[in-house]
Amino acid sequence: MTGVQRRLGLAAPAAGIVVALALAVSAQDQSAIYLLVLDNQSVPVLDIKPSDITIQEDAGPGTVVSVGRYGWPLKLTVLVDNGPGTADALVHLRNGLSRLLEGIPRDIPVTLITTAPNPRYLIRDSKDALQLKNAIGRLTPDDQLGRFSDALGEFARRLDQEFRRVEEGLPPYLPVLVSIATTHADGSEVLRERNERMLLSLRKHRVWTTMVMVTPGRRANDPGNVSNLDVDEGQNAEIAHLVQKVTGGGYIPISSGATTALASNTMPALARQIALRYLKQMTQHRIVFDRVAGASGPMKNFELTLANHPGARVIVSTDGNMP
């Protein structure tokens, strides 16, 4: 399924829930759509039946073939700049990472990568709380610059390699990327073509991104003690904003004097967002339906109606990627 508007969630009327999707659904005879239903307490409804679903388009009503629970798990990768720009915030980085990993479901595999002097694994695809704690303890500062762009590019290339055989349908998991970096002073060889490929891959693989960008304090000139501008100031911030825009992710700015917020607010709040996203992804339903006989071309004025669940709220996705 394709379309300009990928997802739409509507509050439910009392008699039945009608969701009209402003998108062009593919002309395939059999199609699939993904449905998350929440009751009035925001608890996922898990007992959706084919008889609850009605599909309609201008060409006529569709026939629901099957309704099944569809869990699309998450994998979390965290990139951490451990170069000079974050050396003063090392304690806050460790505490913030601990709060992040403590707050997410234990079923989410976690990979931690430091970016200075080169991208390097601290731990890979682990669900073990003790191993993750030990990995955070191995986070140490390096006197060389972090490689922000290089780390993003390597992450994107790994996804290209891992998902290269996924031609139809969804990949085995939804990638979640959290990057903690400085707004400038990157040790990467920043090339436009590489960053364009990276951005295209992140979008292609539906990566859910959060860019946490720390603005370091400016160094002073002698004499006069006047703050100085670095040559590449703001470069990483521009790239991070592009990542946010392309993926529909988040951008969190933090000043060098406010890095305590990593542990007290930023990372716990992000953990709650990831936990909620995990709940949505793992409790949705996949609706497979046939179009009316003789229908051809893109579906027009597609509507899905959910009965027997008054007061519920519906979120529909054409690609299983719940907002």
Image (tube, rainbow, N blue to C red):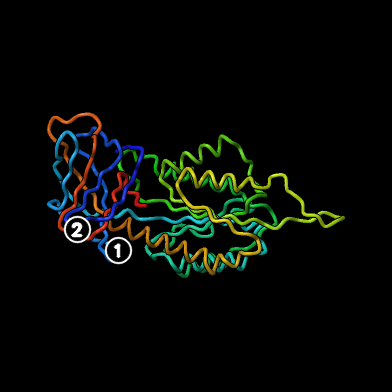
Q: Which residue is mark 1?
A: 42
**Crowd rating for badge 1 (residues with CA inside 10 Å; few <14, some 14–19, many 20+):** few
The x and y percentages for residue 296 are: 20, 29
The x and y percentages for residue 11 are: 28, 55
- Residue 60 visible in the shown view: yes
Which residue appears at 16% of the width and 54% of the height? 307
Residue flagged by tag 1: what amino acid is it?
Ser
Is 153 left or right of 227, judged from the image as shown? Answer: left
Asked where in the image residue 238 lies, by quadrant, the reply is: top right
**Crowd rating for badge 2 (residues with CA inside 10 Å; few <14, some 14–19, many 20+):** few
Q: Nearer the viewer, residue 112 or 197?
A: 197
Considering the numbered disc 2 on the image, is that residue within a helix, a strand or a loop?
loop
Asked where in the image residue 215 lies, by quadrant, the reply is: bottom right
Picture layout, residue 50 above or below residue 138: above
Q: Nearer the viewer, residue 20 or 156?
A: 20
Which residue appears at 24% of the width and 47% of the height? 19
User: In what quadrant of the picture does the N terminus appear?
Assistant: top left
Task: Tell me how far mark 1 sits from mark 2, CA to CA.
Answer: 16 Å
Which residue appears at 21% of the width and 46% of the height? 304
- First along the sequence among labels 1 and 2: 2
Considering the numbered disc 1 on the image, is that residue within a helix, a strand or a loop?
loop
Q: Which mark is residue 138?
A: none
Residue flagged by tag 2: what amino acid is it?
Ala
Q: Could you tell me how many numbered marks the image carries?
A: 2
- Residue 114 visible in the shown view: no
Which residue appears at 39% of the width and 60% of the height? 108
Q: Nearer the viewer, residue 235 or 68?
A: 235
Camera-side mark, 1 or 2:
2
Picture layout, residue 282 above or below residue 244: below
Q: Which residue is mark 2?
A: 14
The x and y percentages for residue 20 are: 25, 44
